[in-house]
Amino acid sequence: MFQCVGDLPQNKTPGNDGLTIEFCLAFLPLFGRLLVDSLNYAFEFGELSNSQKQAIITLIEKKGKDKRMIKNRRPVSLINVDAKIASKMLANHLEKTILNLLCLALTLVNVRNNVNKTW
């Protein structure tokens, strides 16, 4: 989990929980176990807590544009840090799993090609 938190982009606006990645990096040794338990519970029962599922959608202005015009703004979702950490952990796990499956598939194709050549 420490790796996942370290890989997340820093200096970003926090979600409605008010926590930033920098805060999590500083205090992860204190509450990391609680966060892991919370996320394990969510994965076991298939649902995050209500606060972990919340996000705030807001509009931010595009740089160098007239901020009075709505077309010069874009939506952004402010997601809670624990949900970002959970997403990053899942993405890292899926990346490893997909790479392992790809290697296995390529090995099987290679073996099949070699068997076909000998017959």
Image: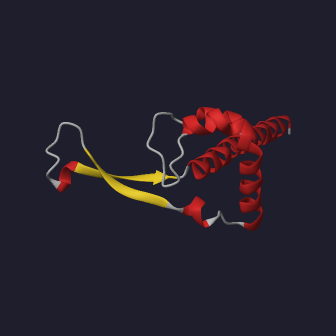
Foreground: 44 or 28? 28
Give the answer, above or below, for where 84 lies relative to 117.
below
**In the rendered view, does 90 fall on the left or right side of 79?**
right
- Quarter of the image with the C terminus in it: top right
Residue 33 on image: x %, y %:
77, 46
Tell me what residue is drawn at x 62 percent, y 44 percent. 88
For the image, the number of numbered tags is: 0
Residue 52 on image: x %, y %:
59, 59
Residue 9 on image: x %, y %:
51, 35
Foreground: 113 or 67? 67
Residue 97 on image: x %, y %:
73, 44
Tell me what residue is drawn at x 67 percent, y 66 percent. 47
**In the rendered view, does 95 fall on the left or right side of 104?**
left
Foreground: 83 or 97? 83
Give the answer, above or below, for where 69 lies relative to 104.
below
**In the rendered view, does 75 fall on the left or right side of 82?**
left
- Quarter of the image with the N terminus in it: top right
**Quarter assignment of residue 96:** top right
Tell me what residue is drawn at x 56 percent, y 38 percent. 21
